[in-house]
Image: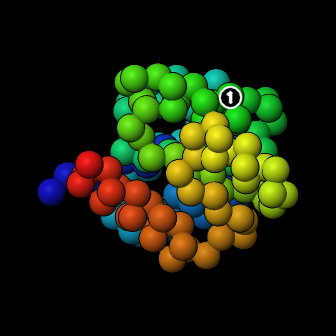
Amino acid sequence: MESKTVLIVEDDPPSLDIFETILRHGGYQVVSARTGAECLERARALLPDAVVLDIGLPDGLAFGVLGELSDDPATEAIPLIVCTVHVFEQDQVRARRAGADVFLVKPVEPRDLLAAVDRLLKASEAA
């Protein structure tokens, strides 16, 4: 069985390294982006099986990225996981309205990240 690809969108190098390590250890192929614009470019070109997105990106495009990925017929089925330090309820509501399937708060437990990716990918396969 071919391994699934996860696009991680994270501007903080240590966090990116941690997420990459967790997902690779879980059997996933990983590609990364550091900005919202780079995320959109890679998501449309590669059509990953899931996206893990930090909404605190320096270019301020994260919520727009969620909306664009959710509204684009080519990418609308890709599960979107927000993983961020932004813990205010309005951030969670805004992320879900923009298309996030799961909202995780940093620091995230490795098992929680893997469980979210696994669960969403199994659900998308069943659909």
121 sits left or right of 66 in the view:
left
- Determine whether the residue tagged by mark 1 lies in a helix, strand or loop: helix
Q: Which residue is mark 1?
A: 64
Q: Position of residue 46 (x, y in %)?
A: 38, 30
107 sits left or right of 53 in the view:
right
Q: Residue at x 38, y 38 (%)?
A: 77
Q: Is residue 24 visible?
A: no
Which quadrant of the structure image shows residue 117?
bottom left
Q: Is residue 14 visible?
A: yes
Q: Residue at x 57, y 25 (%)?
A: 68
Q: Position of residue 104 (x, y in %)?
A: 64, 63
Which quadrant of the structure image shows residue 74?
top left
Q: Is residue 53 above or below residue 106?
A: above
Q: Amino acid at mark 1?
A: Gly
Q: Nearer the viewer, residue 100 or 1?
A: 100
Q: Position of residue 54 (x, y in %)?
A: 68, 48
Q: Residue at x 61, y 76 (%)?
A: 109
Q: Position of residue 9 (x, y in %)?
A: 61, 43
Q: Nearer the viewer, residue 22 or 83?
A: 83
Q: Nearer the viewer, residue 1 or 100?
A: 100
Q: Residue at x 26, y 48 (%)?
A: 127
Say few, some or many: other residues with alpha carbon within 10 Å of mark 1 (under 14 / 14 to 19 / 20 or more).
Answer: some
Q: Is residue 67 above or below residue 13?
A: above
Quarter that holds the N terminus: bottom left
Q: Is residue 42 above or below residue 98?
A: above
